[in-house]
Amino acid sequence: MSVQERKQRERVERERLIVATARELAEQQGWDAVTTRRLAERIEYSQPVLYSHFRGKREIIGAVALEGATEMAAALRAATSAPDGPRTRVTALARTYLDFAARNPAVYDAMFELDGGLAFANEDTPQPLKDAFAALLESLGEVAGDGVHPALFTEVFWAALHGLATLTRARRLPPEDTERRVELLVDRLAMI
């Protein structure tokens, strides 16, 4: 291995460490606790080294969001891979989405609530975000209904899931009724 290849590998490893540490700190203490100073202390590198990877917290949030989108897409695809029919797939998708949001609140916030400098719904949208939307579209597109654009239906269904996730987390909706909400969403919105 050349010196340049080793340095590149070390750079990638440092970047992963920064993202993993930011994610861990945010999940434990919230995003307000994630500062470049605290990250530098935790990873045992100087702040200038951290800034050589990310220009600031905004870019770190964006990196966590992209990682989260990749994980969410994989989880959604795994949950909907069973060939048991559209109703089963859409129900599994909704449950998996809500479970992901509940288990990874800081990552979910990075993806959808905080400014990570990422473009959504345009040509500059990073591939992991497109993949996460595609994972939704793959199951929801088949139940959009006649005359309904599959991507538009997916956006509406996603918005409903996002509302359920954020309102439940904020304790505006009682969590014990989550399963009934999923059933209503699938029965009434997807009408399957």
Image: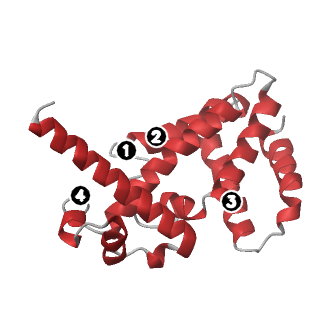
Residue 7: give x, y in percent of width and height.
16, 44
Q: Earlier in the sequence, mark 3 or mark 4?
A: 4
Where on the picture, by quarter, is residue 47? Answer: bottom left
Element type where label 2 sits in the image:
helix
Q: Earlier in the sequence, mark 1 or mark 3?
A: 3
**Residue carrying label 1:** 126
Q: Which residue is mark 4?
A: 53
Q: Report, in whole angstroms, how far the alpha carbon at label 2 lies from the one at label 3.
A: 22 Å
C-alpha gap between disc 1 and disc 3: 24 Å
Secondary structure of the residue carrying tag 3 is helix
Circle on res. 130: 2
Residue located at (36% from left, 76% from top): 38
Q: Nearer the viewer, mark 2 or mark 3?
A: 3
- Tell me if label 3 and label 4 are in contact, CB under 8 Å: no
Q: Nearer the viewer, residue 98 or 2?
A: 2
Query: Nearer the viewer's eye, disc 4 or disc 2?
Result: 4
Q: Are marks 4 and 2 in contact (CB under 8 Å)?
A: no
| Whether residue 162 is situated above or below residue 138 in the rendered picture | below
Mark whose residue sits in front, 1 or 4: 4
